[in-house]
Structures are given as structure tokens and as C-alpha cells.
Image (tube, coloured by chain):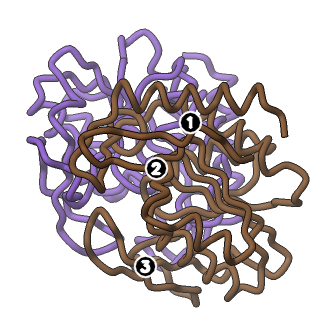
Chain colours: A brown, B purple
Amino acid sequence: MNVAPAERYMKLLEDRIKKDGRLINSDILKVDSFLNHQIDVGLMDAMGEEFARCFSGLGVNKIVTIESSGIPLACAAARAMGGLPVVFAKKAVPNTMTEEFYSATVRSFTKNKVYEAIVSKRFLSEDDVCLIIDDFLASGEAAEGLVKIIEQAGARCAGVGAAIEKEFQGGSAKLRERGLKVVSLAVITSLADDRIQFKSTYEC
Amino acid sequence: MNVAPAERYMKLLEDRIKKDGRLINSDILKVDSFLNHQIDVGLMDAMGEEFARCFSGLGVNKIVTIESSGIPLACAAARAMGGLPVVFAKKAVPNTMTEEFYSATVRSFTKNKVYEAIVSKRFLSEDDVCLIIDDFLASGEAAEGLVKIIEQAGARCAGVGAAIEKEFQGGSAKLRERGLKVVSLAVITSLADDRIQFKSTYEC
């Protein structure tokens, strides 16, 4: 564990959340000016480099995410890890999807609905070691859906990386119970009382 | 017009389409192994650099795309243009979207349905000069929707860049009639008779 860069990346993202994040209620933090509607590609690259550092040496050969908000960060991580392929799960079956696919049911927290996440069988195999990357880790539903898809393919999941974790919604604890390494670059312990509270320690 | 890089980029993408593209029918070409389900980030970066070259000197300060498949290419172009912000239009209103937005109705070719593309009013202003980036340019419906959104904001659209254009579906002609610069890195003139036919000239 290298303390210096960890502290640097924590601070970079935390400062941005403090500056540009907006509290909608005690469950929802809006960071759409840099993470999931408007994208700061420089910040994505910095976070991608930190994921590359945290998940090095695990044999990861593929980045897996889910459309849409996870895609910029997944691509940045893939680039930082030497140009790995990114596979993003789709939330609807396009009419160009003519072959078999893996799927898992996922409940979306921000959209308050259930959808099917799907990945073509051509893009995951039992030789793959996957790293799941997403913008948010909240209840962990999306990441658990991706883990199920990876398992259906007989592939291995090396871990989960998220930009922002809402620790109080329990997702990271559930994923760690499965034995997965979880790295969140900013961990929020509470959004209650109109205040964003960050965890002071950082695990990588 | 610089012939050497243009020819290089045309060839890079054309060769990949010939190698990995799959013809579904005379309208649909599937390139999901590198462009819009599994992503080759190295190819995205090469295409992003070519868009940066083609659209330099136009004062572009923002990249605009639409979820999901346009996002990796839009981020690559933004990075190649010095780290411009990317704004991606959403196809559904998330419950974190609590403020006013611009919107346009778009018909999706591959999903055969109509949806509303929306962008928060906070991320487009009359000072913006936008470059629209997308994976495919077919009938031009998505790009035209984004142009309408940009116009609603009083911003200016400097042009449209696409990885693959299906010229026979008429989108680029409609966009050029609006006075927009359109650059497609691979232009397909026909998918009939189980054959992918490319245009031999390249406009940048």
C-alpha cells in the first residue's frame, strides 16, 4: 500500500465533490457536472490510473461496466491498464443483437426501475479475468448483476472499482462478503443533515 | 487537407470493419466487437486524434454525444482536443434530474423506437461551440436531435463526426444541407448483396 498517491487521488475527487456535488436528499448526491452527464475526461484519466495501480498484478484482461455512466471511467481504466478491451452491459436488447447473451436482473436506484443487463456471449469467456468499473457504488445491485454475468461465462471477477461509494447503502459490504476486492476512490459515509461526510481512510 | 493521415485513418477503420464487422442485412452492419458493445480504446484514441485534426481551428469548446455508444468516441475526441468537457444526452429522465432541460425527439434506427434525448440546461450555453460525435451516422436522426438541443441553448454546432457512416441512409446529406461540416472516418455506400462497399474518397 502506497500512501502518497492514494491520498492524492482521494483528495482530487473529494475536492471536486465538495466543489461541484449537489445534495438532492439524504440518499442522492448529484455529480452530473463532471461524472455522469457532463464528463471531465482529465479526471477520468486520473481515476483510471489509480484503478490501474490498485488492481495491478491480478491478471485482469478485461474491463466490464454497464451503460451509460460507467463507460467513460471504464475506458479510462482500460487505457491506463495498457489498452484492455472494455465490455459494457446493455440495458435493452438492440435488434443488432442476434445471438445468445448472458443476463442478470438489476434494480436501478436512481431510475427506480428493474431492468435486464445483458452481455453477448461472444465477449466473455472462461479465460477472462474481469475488473468491474462503475461511476457509483451504492446498494451494489449493478455490480452484483455484472458479477452474475461474469460467473455465467465461467470467467473470474478480480474486483470492483467505483469512483464514488455511498457506503451507508451497503453495496461494498455485500461485494466484499463475496471475496471481491473493492476500491472506491471517494467513500461517503453519510448524506444526512445536508452534509456530505467522507470516510477518512482509503483502501487500495 | 492533409492526405497522408486521412488515408491512414480511413485504412485503420476500414480494415477493422472488414476483419470484424458482420453484415446482418442490407441495412445493418454489426461492429460490436470493437465499437459499441466491446470497445477497443486504442482505436477510439486514434479516431479521436483524427477528429481533433479535422475540426481544429473552429473554436470547439465542448463535445456533445448521446448515450451510450457515442460516449467512448466522444471521450477520446475530447481528450485529443486538450481535455474538452463531454456532455452526453440522456434517453430517459433520471430522478436526479431535478432541473430544466433541453430535449428533442429521436427515432432510433437499431432499436426501432422513438425516445426523448435530454440535456440539462446547466451544461449548454450560448457561449458554447459544440462538436457532435457519435459511433454511427445513418439516417442522421440522433445528430439532428443533438443539433436541435444545441440550437435550443443558443449555442453553435461546429460539425458532426462519426466513426462509420452509412451514406445510403441519407443522414450526412441532410446535415450538410444545414451547413454543418460532417466527417465520417469510414463511409459505407452499400451493404447490399452481402457486401460492404466503402467510398474511396475521404473528406476532412
User: Looking at the image, is mark 1 or mark 2 earlier in the sequence?
Assistant: 1
Residue behind mark 2: A189
As drawn, is B95 to the left or to the right of A18? Answer: left
The x and y percentages for residue A191 are 33, 47
State whether residue A171 is above or below residue B159. Answer: below
Disc 1 from disc 2: Cα separation = 23 Å
Dot 2 amino acid type: Thr
Q: What residue type is labelled 1?
A: Met
Whichever of labels 3 and 2 marks the residue nearer the N terminus, that label is 3
Q: Identify the secondary structure beneath mark 3.
A: strand
Q: Which amino acid does label 3 sit on?
A: Val
Give the image quarter of residue A91. bottom left
Front tag of 1 and 2: 2
In contact (CB < 8 Å): disc 3 and disc 1: no
Circle 1 marks a residue in which chain?
Answer: A
Residue at 78% in and 75% down: A156
Q: In which quarter of the image is the N terminus of chain A?
A: top right
Q: Where is residue B168 in the image (x, y as percent from the top left)?
A: 36, 57
Chain ID for label 3? A
Q: What element carries label 2?
A: strand
Q: Nearer the viewer, residue B179 or A117?
A: A117
Q: How crowded is mark 1: few (under 14 residues within 10 Å), some or many (20 or more)?
A: many
Counting from the top left corner in percent of width and height, residue A147 is at 63, 76
Foreground pick, B77 / B165? B77
Residue A44's disc is 1
Q: In this view, does A181 lie above or below A135?
A: below
> How many neighbours does mark 3 have within 10 angstroms: few (below 14), some (14-19), or many (20 or more)?
some
| Disc 3 target residue | A106
In the image, residue B109 lies at what x, y percent?
30, 67
The span from disc 3 to disc 1 (Cα, nearest Å) is: 25 Å
